[in-house]
């Protein structure tokens, strides 16, 4: 039985609460949230033995807890990850891992020193359609990647929309193609809180990506288009069915994929890695590379 603590009971924390209380190999022992009023909202879903507190240090120092899930604003991640690792806990942190490449390197070094599993919650890496593309389709040389990640909110105050949403596409690119460092960035952000971004990125490998993100769009869009010499793929995650389509010359195939909830896949992978000491698909090194990409793009998109 893996014993968990959850920090953050907001937009994503509530989904971790649902899953952590449904997985048979997990016991949720404690939840920390900066506002105690939220606990009454989820009273019926919180296990009776689970301790609720507004003091994260109390949760982190609980010797009965093996693993910590961090689902708090991005600007708090660096401090919380450090404290959790130093307390001897395995850590699953929501994306973005941290907000700068410098912070990411420090976290990667600390995770190695502590010998604990650190995994970043890039959900799309645990999407069964993305796994299918990784294991069952060869694009050959990739001509371009087009990512659209749009929504009508919520507008965050801790990071801009690219660091919030663009990291999904960067994680997919790193996972599928490992394109190396960023060679060039052209693009811009707009809005008082970087509400919209459109950026073109060239990688050392030659891969070209155009990424559009927004949290003030009138409709929700989660779409990835990849064009390669052996064929193309479109993943439209807002569709009810046939989310993934593969194109070979003039023919189109909709592969049969058993789709599970990506967040559940993610948690199960984390538990497996803690139990076996295997390196996660989105471990500290992976998170470091994606954070470096994101940091480079954010710093250069308006230059």
Image (tube, rainbow, N blue to C red):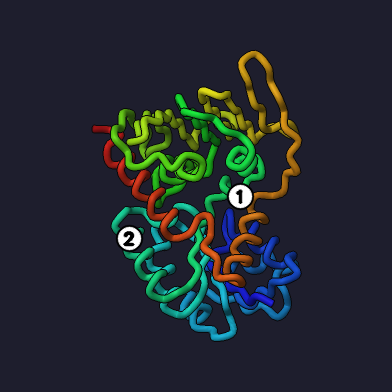
Does 170 sit left or right of 35 as displayed? left
Q: Is residue 205 above or below residue 285?
A: above
Q: Is residue 219 visible in the rendered structure shown here?
A: yes
Q: Quadrant of residue 285?
A: bottom left
Residue 51, position in %: x, y?
Answer: 62, 79
Residue 262, position in %: x, y?
Answer: 65, 50
87 or 15, nearer to the observer: 87
195 or 113, nearer to the observer: 113
Q: Which residue is the site of mark 2?
A: 105
Crowd around label 2: few <14 · some 14–19 · many ≥20 (10 Å): some
52 or 237, nearer to the observer: 237
Residues marked 1 and 2 touching at CB (< 8 Å)? no
Identify the residue shown where x is 51% and y is 63%.
279
Identify the residue shown where x is 42% and y is 30%.
209
Q: Is residue 35 visible in the rendered structure shown here?
A: no
Q: Is residue 149 above or below residue 281?
A: above
Residue 23, position in %: x, y?
Answer: 73, 66
> What number is the disc on residue 126?
1
Residue 50, position in %: x, y?
Answer: 66, 77
User: Quick one: quadrant of the N terminus?
Assistant: bottom right
* Distance of label 1 from label 2 (alpha carbons): 24 Å
Q: Residue furthest left?
A: 303
- Counting residues from the N terminus, which is met first, the one under dot 1 or under dot 2? 2
Identify the residue shown where x is 75% and y is 69%.
24
């Amino acid at each position: 039985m893996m014993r968990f603590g959850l920090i953050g009971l907001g937009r994503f924390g509530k989904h971790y609460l649902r899953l952590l209380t449904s997985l048979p190999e997990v016991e949720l022992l404690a939840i920390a949230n900066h506002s105690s009023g939220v606990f009454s909202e989820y009273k019926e879903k919180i296990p009776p033995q689970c301790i609720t507190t507004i003091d994260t240090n109390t949760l982190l120092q609980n010797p009965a807890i093996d693993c910590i899930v961090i689902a708090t604003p991005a600007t708090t991640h660096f401090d919380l990850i450090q404290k959790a690792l130093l307390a001897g806990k395995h850590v699953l942190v929501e994306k973005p891992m941290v907000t700068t490449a410098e912070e990411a390197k420090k976290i990667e070094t600390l995770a190695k020193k502590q010998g604990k599993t650190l995994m970043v919650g890039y959900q799309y890496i645990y999407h069964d359609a993305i796994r299918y593309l990784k294991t069952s389709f060869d694009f050959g040389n990739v001509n371009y990647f087009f990512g659209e990640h749009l929504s009508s909110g919520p507008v965050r105050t801790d990071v801009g929309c690219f660091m919030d949403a663009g990291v999904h596409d960067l994680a997919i690119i790193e996972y599928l193609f490992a394109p190396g460092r960023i060679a060039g960035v052209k693009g811009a952000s707009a809005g008082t809180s970087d509400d919209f971004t459109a950026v073109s990125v060239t990688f050392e490998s030659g891969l070209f990506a155009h990424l559009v993100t927004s949290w003030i769009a009138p409709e929700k869009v989660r779409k990835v288009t990849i064009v390669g010499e052996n064929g193309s793929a479109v993943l439209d995650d807002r569709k009810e069915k046939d989310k993934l389509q593969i194109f070979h010359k003039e023919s189109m195939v909709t592969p049969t994929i058993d789709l599970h909830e990506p967040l559940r896949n993610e948690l199960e992978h984390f538990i497996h890695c803690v139990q076996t000491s295997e390196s996660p698909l989105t471990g500290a090194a992976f998170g470091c590379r994606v954070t470096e990409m994101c940091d480079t793009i954010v710093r250069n998109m308006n230059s």
